[in-house]
Image (cartoon, helix red, strand yellow):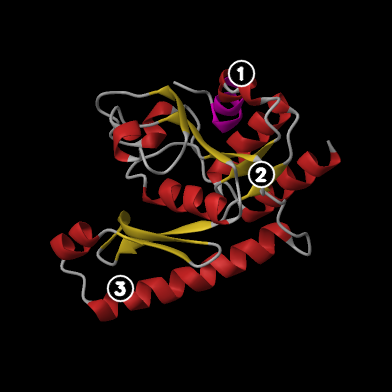
């Protein structure tokens, strides 16, 4: 188990040292992924930015992803989940409308007036605190590619055992510290998995800029 997200980020950073000379940009998924990413960026002496994506949750079970949205009009739909959960087009549209507004709000809140760090021709290291369904991570990788990244690396502390097969077309390289046969919940692999706040995300990003 990891003590907390900072501990997981330090360990993940050690595993990613081989990317130090590839002109990397570390991209954290808000909120929890940004603290992990901040430690990775420090280890690689690389710039840190957010890559804002939003999960589209089934209305009756918001934790179950039926798709995801990302900056740059990236949109992923999981038709099988939509069908199995009986989500109507109207219900899907309502969820998407709300999440799109939240995506815009978060992008403005986290970056303020700062532009996105350019990814053209660089290695984009997409970092989260863990992967469950993978829909959010897939959207983040697609956003990075759309912004011109030459190489996309998806790196997390914990992921399902079959995550590379499930996401094989999303990234060029996959790094996970733990891939248990039975993942159950990401939070089970952390002693402290308390929710991060918007203010904390802004602080981590500002600290990275000062560094």
Q: Earlier in the sequence, mark 1 or mark 2?
A: 1
Question: Quick one: label 1, few (<14), some, or many (20+) residues within 10 Å?
Answer: few
The residues bearing labels 3 and 2 have C-alpha atoms spaced at a distance of 36 Å
Local SS, label 1: helix
Q: Position of residue 141 (x, y in %)?
A: 49, 47
Q: Residue at x 66, y 48 (%)?
A: 119
Is residue 136 positioned above or below 102 on the image?
Answer: above
First to last magenta residue range: 4-11
Splitting the image into 4 quarters, where does residue 14 fall?
A: top right
Nearer to us in this view, 25 or 39: 25
Left or right position of 178 against 162: right
Q: Look at 56% across and 50% down and name the residue there.
A: 144
Q: Farthest residue in the bottom direction?
A: 90
Where does the image place residue 56, in percent across and percent down from the top left? Answer: 37, 62
* Left or right: 127 as drawn, with respect to 135: right
Q: Is residue 31 above or below residue 175?
A: below
- Quarter of the figure that contains the C terminus: top right
- Please name which of the two marks, 3 or 2, marks the residue nearer to the observer: 2
* Residue tagged 2: 121
Q: Which residue is mark 1?
A: 14
Quick one: label 3 or label 2, which is nearer the N terminus? 3
User: Do callouts 1 and 2 mark residues in contact (Cβ within 8 Å)?
Assistant: no
Cα distance in 3D space between marks 1 and 3 = 41 Å
Please rate how many residues cluster around mark 3, counting C-alpha atoms within 10 Å: few if below 14, some from 14 to 19, many from 20: some
| Mark 2 element type | loop
Horizontal and vertical percent position of residue 19? 63, 25
Q: Residues within 10 Å of mark 2 (few under 14, many from 20)?
A: some
Q: Which residue is mark 3?
A: 92
Residue occupying image coordinates x 64% and y 30%: 40
């Amino acid at each position: 188990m990891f003590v907390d997200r900072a501990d997981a980020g330090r360990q993940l950073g050690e595993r990613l040292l081989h990317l130090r000379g590839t002109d990397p940009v570390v991209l954290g998924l808000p909120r929890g992924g940004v603290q992990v990413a901040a430690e990775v960026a420090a280890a690689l002496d690389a710039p840190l930015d957010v890559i804002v994506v939003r999960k589209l949750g089934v209305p009756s079970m918001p934790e179950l992803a039926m798709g995801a949205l990302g900056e740059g009009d990236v949109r992923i739909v999981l038709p099988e989940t939509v069908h199995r959960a009986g989500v109507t087009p109207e219900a899907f549209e309502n969820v998407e409308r709300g999440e799109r507004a939240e995506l815009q709000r978060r992008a403005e809140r986290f970056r303020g007036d700062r532009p996105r760090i350019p990814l053209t021709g660089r290695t984009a290291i997409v970092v989260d605190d863990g992967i469950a369904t993978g829909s959010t991570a897939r959207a983040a990788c697609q956003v990075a590619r759309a912004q011109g990244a030459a190489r996309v690396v998806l790196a997390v502390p914990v992921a399902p055992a079959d995550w590379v097969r499930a996401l094989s077309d999303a990234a060029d390289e996959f790094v996970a510290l733990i891939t248990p046969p039975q993942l159950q919940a990401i939070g089970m692999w952390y002693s402290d998995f308390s929710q991060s706040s918007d203010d904390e995300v802004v602080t981590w990003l500002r600290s990275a800029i000062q560094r």
